[in-house]
Image (cartoon, rainbow, N blue to C red):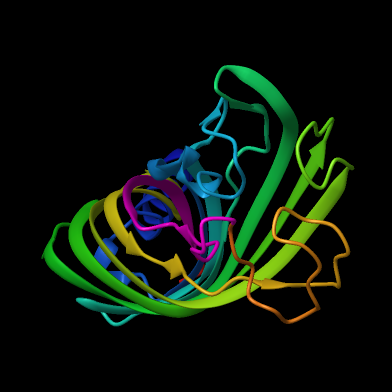
Amino acid sequence: MKTLLVILFLSSIARARVFDMSETRFGGYFSATYGASSVGKKFFEGESSADSYTKGFDTHMGGEFGFVYNTDHLSWLFGLEIIKPSKIKGIASASGTAVYSYTSDISAYIPKAGVEVVFYQAKTYRIFGQAYFGTGDLTVKTDYSNLTIAPNTDFSIEGKSTANLMNYSLGTEFHWNDNTTIVLAYSYRQLNFRNIKYLADVTNSFTGAASKGDRIMKSDGSPLKYDFTNTYITLGLRFWVQ
């Protein structure tokens, strides 16, 4: 009799713990993102009399965390996305001769909100589409050294910018363990920082002195900009509270 009661009790617990996508309501999430960059060496081209560069921004890596509120086939998401391309170190040359070294570091932080629509849902997985909107902040710092062209002295440039984000995804979520699910998505991001301004006064640069708040310009007359627009893959986890 005792054995039967124990079996019934354990069975009731097992049934209570069966995961069902339709019963998820509120949870937190974090994810990692990776995609190719269309920026490459274009970020540096035209900044000086150099005509070739050894390194550019070839990939965009980042992460995101936030929370999600689900109403069965419609969810609301609120999060913070961080995009951090790898810091690069390169050499600029003119007609095959090295004229300076450069080190560049870029980061973008984007608070955003989105909606998720479920196209198909079963107990342990679902297929969805997402749309996000937000406003991002960019910071950039580039150090120049070993210059053999004007201004013939080491200098640094620090800039900042803001831009609006539009983000669309198609993905799937499936049960992994307990109340945890895995999310895999293919995404498109539109985020272009076209107006980067100096964070501080500069005395030396390829275009001469500049003041804080001035738009950063290249030697060829074009503005410095950074375009994060690309497609990328997202892999993440969701932790459902209920």
Residue 113 sits above or below residue 57 on the image = below
Whether residue 7 is visible: no
Residue sitting nearer the eye, 133 or 161: 161
Q: Residue 116, position in %: x, y?
A: 27, 73
Q: Is residue 139 magenta?
A: no
Identity of the residue drawn at 67% across and 70% down:
160
Q: Quadrant of residue 177?
A: top left
Q: Is residue 218 left or right of residue 11?
A: right
Instruction: Locate the C terminus by quadrant.
Output: bottom left
Identity of the residue drawn at 20% across and 65% down:
129
Residue 93 sits above or below residue 84 on the image = above
Residue sitting nearer the eye, 138 or 224: 224
Q: Residue 58, position in %: x, y?
A: 46, 35
Residue sitting nearer the eye, 236 or 217: 217
Residue sitting nearer the eye, 61 or 124: 61
Q: Count all numbered tags in the image, as a single digit.
A: 0
Q: Is residue 227 magenta?
A: yes
Instruction: Locate the N terminus by quadrant.
Output: top left
Which residue is outermost to the top?
96
Segment colored magenta: 219-239
